[in-house]
């Protein structure tokens, strides 16, 4: 194939990916009640959200529909991208690429689920009820709720990529299991700091709730880097 043929093929991949994302976005937009029932589930029945902008709820609806459409289309997007680059790879490289993509996708999804079911509800409960004074009440906007959920989900999804990153670094010979075992204590300190950044709460329970799974990921990373 010529360079122009490759550009045409890439253009086709992009159009197909955008088309599938758009279709799923429309589906998510139509099924508004079901989508927002899932999104608002972590807040429980006690917390009430408010909207302060005229176009606020519609904009949030569009944004959430796009996110849902993109997440739903991600397996298809990854397949299309792999199908585009696969002809330029050796058989061994193809198998390696599949392992990396599938593993990264699964670990990211696990991080998002961990945030949704564990971290975000605790964070919301703490911050939603925190007051500097009894004279100041909390009125949490829908936009703030969605932004916090998105930020925490993205951060936990990235953090859960630790085993995949360590495995790749191990394949390149940059780290190994013995090196990671030797730096367990500094790694634990770094994990505690990262956990404190992810969970802006002051209670030790929530901090441990994040620290322990990430440290277990570090131990799992030691296993996957063994030769």
Image (cartoon, rainbow, N blue to C red):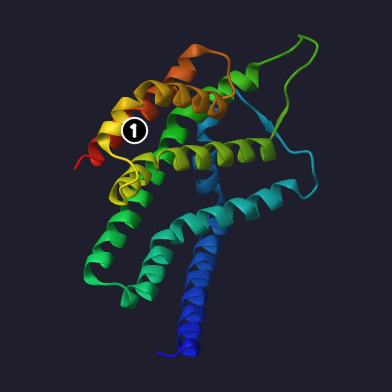
Residue 209 position (above or below residue 142): above
Give the residue at x 71% y 14%: 131
Point out residue 73 in the picture as x, y percentages from the top left corner: 45, 61
Q: Quadrant of residue 101?
A: bottom left
Residue 219 position (above or below residue 98): above
Question: Left of 36 or right of it: where is 187?
Answer: left
Quarter that holds the C terminus: top left
Name, please, the residue furthest toward the left.
227
Nearer to me, 58 or 97: 97
Point out residue 194 in the picture as x, y percentages from the top left corner: 51, 28
Give the residue at x 46% y 34%: 115
Nearer to me, 93 or 209: 93
Quarter that holds the N terminus: bottom left
Label 1 secondary element:
helix
Residue 134 position (above or below residue 223): above
Q: Which residue is mark 1?
A: 217
Question: Left of 175 or right of it: where is 158?
Answer: right
Point out residue 220 in the picture as x, y percentages from the top left corner: 28, 34
């Amino acid at each position: 194939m010529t360079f122009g043929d490759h550009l045409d093929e890439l253009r086709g991949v992009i159009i197909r990916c955008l088309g599938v994302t758009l279709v799923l976005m429309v589906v998510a937009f139509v099924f508004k009640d079901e989508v927002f029932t899932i999104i608002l589930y972590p807040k429980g029945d006690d917390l009430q959200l408010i909207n302060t902008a005229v176009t606020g709820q519609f904009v949030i609806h569009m944004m959430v529909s796009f996110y849902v459409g993109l997440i739903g289309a991600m397996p298809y997007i990854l397949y299309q991208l792999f199908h585009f680059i696969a002809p330029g790879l050796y058989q061994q490289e193809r198998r390696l690429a599949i392992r990396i993509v599938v593993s990264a996708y699964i670990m990211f999804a696990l991080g998002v689920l961990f945030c949704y079911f564990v971290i975000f509800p605790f964070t919301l409960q703490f911050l939603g009820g925190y007051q500097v004074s009894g004279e100041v009440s909390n009125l949490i906007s829908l936009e703030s709720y969605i932004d916090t959920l998105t930020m925490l989900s993205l951060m936990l999804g990235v953090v859960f990529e630790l085993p995949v990153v360590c495995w790749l670094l191990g394949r390149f010979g940059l780290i190994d299991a013995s090196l990671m075992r030797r730096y367990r204590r500094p790694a634990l300190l770094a994990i505690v700091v990262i956990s404190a950044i992810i969970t802006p709460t002051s209670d030790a329970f929530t901090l441990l709730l994040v620290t322990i799974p990430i440290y277990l990921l570090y131990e799992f990373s030691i296993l996957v880097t063994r030769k």
